[in-house]
């Protein structure tokens, strides 16, 4: 990057918000897993959409690539400067700017954390439909960029289902804003829906307006034990059919539970070991416990059950599932391959994929958990080098063979670019490239993620 471009960026955001000291920029150049590490000559921290537009315009003119970054909680290398790009940090664009209790909507800057959005919604007598373990650091901009799912997709859908308005800066430097939040608005292309899941390759989200959902104050959380993955998956289907109040439905295995208990010092939920576990949470405005208990009684395959209604006890049960990520990360930088399977193939995949991994690399260890209610399995692999791709290739091809998706909610990023063709046709990829060329003609926005190189 030229001195001239650097000086122009400094003038836009102010000297205190352009960081070029290597010891500071390094913290922006590594992802949450530690697997993806890059470098950047500068981190630019704009304070509003106008400054973002000015930064994009200068970089477009100077041919300088940008990586938009929010809370940097990504897991596929999509938000770090692996090619030496300038980091466009959106953390200053934080804060809920408008809450509309009548419409059940709120607006927030892209740097606002999911936890802060949830708190603002609660203050207005509503709830936000997206929740995930990284809620305290993940930002609304990042979750829109990846169309994040999380723990309540089963009931409320992913981030795209919550998005009712947006403000963004395209790769042209133009600001586009459609923040009205009208529930019915058939006035042409859904640019917000297009930007959601685009991983910062088409535009830089600067603000979002999201729909809110009714509060469900009465909650019951349960961990159910099963002797087989098939029994757990079958039970998950029955729970979905029989329990309208079901909000979250998670799967984990004995090996993962043992790791979490060793890592955190927690006691296991049961005295005996079991093959598979479901964590089910029902939430309603009335007590869902009687309905939940009746459904459990109808599932003969349940070997043991732990139920909690008080917040502290429910949190303890949730830790068995949510602490998987941190416990696995403590073993070394994992390969995180979040995938979706068709319901009929889900149990087969969970049981078979450790063998697929082991055949590709005998030193690899597989850890499985995920959102069984929507078919999403998080395949975590430890014991292999960060840049080794043999295991990734085997898993991605097995997923495609079973009719699944190679990315459920973390995005494609850098990690999965080589395998996007398994789920998308040549015609689709060409359409993606044309959209990219239209909205980011200079190709400066996150150029090393999502789309595979041509040729």
Image: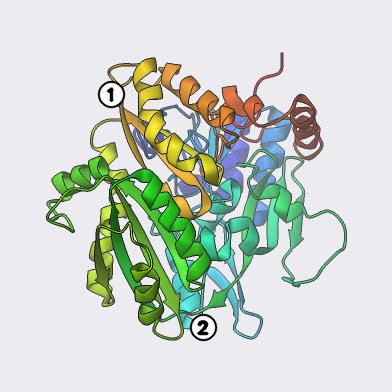
> Which one is nearer the viewer's eye here, 294 or 99?
294
Residue 33, how many percent across, how many down?
36, 36
Taking the image as shown, residue 34 lies to the left or right of residue 116, namely: left
> Which of the two residues, 283 or 201, is positioned nearer the viewer here?
283
Q: Quadrant of residue 201?
A: top right
* Residue indicated by mark 1: 383
Name the residue rendered at 54%, 52% in the picture: 143
Q: Residue at x 59, y 31 (%)?
A: 449
Above or below 172: residue 422: above
Neighbour tally class for label 1: few under 14, some 14-19, many 20 plus, Cα within 10 Å: some
Q: Position of residue 66 (x, y in %)?
A: 60, 35
Residue under the image location 24 percent in, 40 percent down: 255
The reply to whether residue 307 is visible in this rendering is: yes
Name the quarter where the N terminus is drawn.
top right
Q: Earlier in the sequence, mark 2 or mark 1?
A: 2
Q: Nearer the viewer, mark 2 or mark 1?
A: 1
Residue displayed at 74% across by 71% down: 180
What element does badge 2 sit on? Answer: loop
Disc assigned to residue 124: 2
Question: In the rendered image, which quarter contains the C terminus?
Answer: top right
Q: Residue furthest right?
A: 187
Relative placement, left or right, of 155 versus 287 is right
Tell me the CA gap for discs 2 and 1. 47 Å
Q: Position of residue 149 (x, y in %)?
A: 52, 53
Q: How many marks?
A: 2
Tell me: residue 385, above or below residue 443.
above
As drawn, 198 above or below 29 = below
Residue 85, horizontal then vertical, whole percent: 55, 29
Element at label 1: loop
């Amino acid at each position: 990057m030229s001195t001239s471009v650097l000086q122009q960026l400094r003038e836009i955001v102010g000297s205190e918000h352009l960081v070029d000291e290597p010891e500071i920029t390094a913290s922006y150049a590594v992802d949450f897993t530690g697997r993806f590490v890059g470098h950047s000559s500068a981190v630019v921290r704009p304070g509003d959409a106008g400054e973002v537009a000015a930064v994009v315009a200068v970089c477009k003119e100077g041919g300088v690539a940008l990586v938009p970054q929010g809370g940097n909680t990504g897991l596929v290398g999509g938000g770090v400067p692996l090619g030496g790009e300038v980091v466009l940090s959106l953390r200053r664009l934080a804060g809920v700017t408008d809450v509309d209790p009548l419409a059940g909507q709120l607006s927030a800057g892209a740097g606002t954390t999911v936890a802060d959005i949830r708190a603002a919604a609660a203050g207005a007598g509503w709830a936000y439909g997206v929740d995930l373990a990284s809620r305290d650091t993940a930002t609304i901009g990042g979750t829109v960029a990846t169309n994040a799912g999380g723990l309540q997709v089963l009931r409320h859908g992913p981030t795209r289902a919550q998005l009712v308005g947006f403000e963004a800066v395209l790769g042209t430097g133009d600001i586009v804003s459609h923040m009205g939040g009208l529930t019915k608005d058939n006035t042409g292309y859904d640019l917000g829906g297009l930007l959601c899941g685009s991983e910062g390759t088409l535009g830089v989200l600067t603000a979002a307006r999201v729909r809110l959902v009714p509060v469900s104050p009465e909650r019951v959380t349960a961990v159910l034990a099963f002797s087989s993955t098939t029994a757990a998956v079958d039970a998950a289907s029955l729970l979905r059919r029989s329990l309208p109040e079901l909000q979250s439905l998670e799967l984990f295995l004995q090996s993962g539970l043992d790791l979490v208990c060793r890592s955190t010092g927690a006691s296991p939920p049961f005295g005996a070991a079991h093959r598979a576990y479901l964590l089910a949470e029902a939430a309603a405005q009335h007590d869902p416990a009687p309905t939940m208990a009746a459904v459990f009684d109808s599932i003969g395959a349940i070997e043991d059950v732990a139920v909690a209604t008080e917040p502290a006890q429910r949190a303890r049960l949730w830790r068995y599932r949510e602490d998987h990520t941190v416990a696995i990360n403590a073993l070394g930088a994992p390969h995180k391959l979040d995938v979706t399977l068709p319901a009929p193939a889900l149990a087969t995949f969970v049981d078979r994929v450790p063998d697929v991994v082991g055949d590709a690399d005998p030193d690899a260890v597989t850890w499985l958990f995920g959102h069984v209610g929507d078919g999403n399995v998080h395949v975590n692999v430890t014991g292999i080098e960060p840049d080794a791709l043999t295991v990734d290739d085997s898993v991605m091809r097995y997923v495609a063979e079973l009719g699944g998706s190679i990315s459920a909610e973390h995005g494609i990023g850098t990690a999965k670019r080589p395998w996007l063709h398994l789920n998308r046709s040549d015609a689709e990829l060409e359409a993606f490239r044309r959209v990219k060329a239209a909205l980011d003609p200079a190709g400066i926005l996150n150029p090393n993620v999502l789309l595979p190189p041509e040729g």
